[in-house]
């Protein structure tokens, strides 16, 4: 099996998939209702994101440059040897490696003052809830914690799984790609690149 890696720091995806998705198609939603259909869709999203991130890296240096986020403005500034690039962003979520958890941006109180930067997070969370995505972990502890804190404990898969959720958010929102830096040794943030200026 062939894998490729994106600038989302290690997301591994298969090279090609035959499943195509139309969000308005009831037939496609029925296909997604199975674990296999949903997994195929997520893998397709991940594959597409790899290509999009490659374009962002080649064209704008995103992923290879220093960055500075201004979440009140909804922007990230990328600076590198060739200059400065400003991107309009949305936040999908955050990951914490101390407890191996992922928290949707739309459920994170830190982002409550900026509802416009969590639209894709809410859209994706709602979509995956409709598809019963959480239950792929089959853990009553995760289910209870998710209902109480809106935080999913994923164990060692927290970062790769957050990357997959970001790929779905990228697809559903029509973003240009994603950027997922570690903010410090234990916390990472998952951005969607909506527009590059």
Image (tube, grey):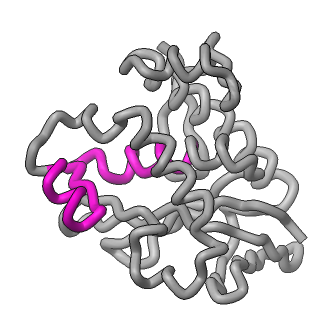
Q: Can residue 10 be seen here?
A: no
Q: Which percent across, then down, holds residue 114?
A: 59, 82
In which image quadrant can residue 63 be found?
A: bottom right
Total numbered labels: 0
- Please tell me whether the stretch drawn in magenta is mainly helix, strand or loop: helix
- The residue depicted at 63 percent of the width and 82 percent of the height is 69
In which image quadrant can residue 140 be found?
A: top left
Q: Is residue 167 left or right of residue 156?
A: right
| 27, 93: nearer the viewer | 27
Q: Can residue 57 be seen here?
A: yes
In which image quadrant can residue 178 be found?
A: bottom right
Write the start and end of the magenta stretch as one range. Answer: 142-167
- The residue depicted at 52 percent of the width and 59 percent of the height is 122
Q: Is residue 196 left or right of residue 72?
A: right
Q: Residue furthest front?
A: 26
Rendered view: 152 above or below 72: above
Q: Which percent across, then down, holds residue 197?
A: 90, 71
Rendered view: 41 above or below 117: above
| 126, 70: nearer the viewer | 126
- The residue depicted at 53 percent of the width and 49 percent of the height is 124
| 27, 77: nearer the viewer | 27
Rendered view: 128 above or below 114: above
Q: Is residue 53 left or right of residue 6?
A: right
Task: Give yes or no for residue 121 being in the magenta stretch.
Answer: no
- The residue depicted at 57 percent of the width and 52 percent of the height is 123
Q: Which percent across, then down, holds residue 121?
A: 53, 59
Q: Residue furthest left?
A: 141
Q: Which percent across, then down, holds residue 68?
A: 65, 83
């Amino acid at each position: 099996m062939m894998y490729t890696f994106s600038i989302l720091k290690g997301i591994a995806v298969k090279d090609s998939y035959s499943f195509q998705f139309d969000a308005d198609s009831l037939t496609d939603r029925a296909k997604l209702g199975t674990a296999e259909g949903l997994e195929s869709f997520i893998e397709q999203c991940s594959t597409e994101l790899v290509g999009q991130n490659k374009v962002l890296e080649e064209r704008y240096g995103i992923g290879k440059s220093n960055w500075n986020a201004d979440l009140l403005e909804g922007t990230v500034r990328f600076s590198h040897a060739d200059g400065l690039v400003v991107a309009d962003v949305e936040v999908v979520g955050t990951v914490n490696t101390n407890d191996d958890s992922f928290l949707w941006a739309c459920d994170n109180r830190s982002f409550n003052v900026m509802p416009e930067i969590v639209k894709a997070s809410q859209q994706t969370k709602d979509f995956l809830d409709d598809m019963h995505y959480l239950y792929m972990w089959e853990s009553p502890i995760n289910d209870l914690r998710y209902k109480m804190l809106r935080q999913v404990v994923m164990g060692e898969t927290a970062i790769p799984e957050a990357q997959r959720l970001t790929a779905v958010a990228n697809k559903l929102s029509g973003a240009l790609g994603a950027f997922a830096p570690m903010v410090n040794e234990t916390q990472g943030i998952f951005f969607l690149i909506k527009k590059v200026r």
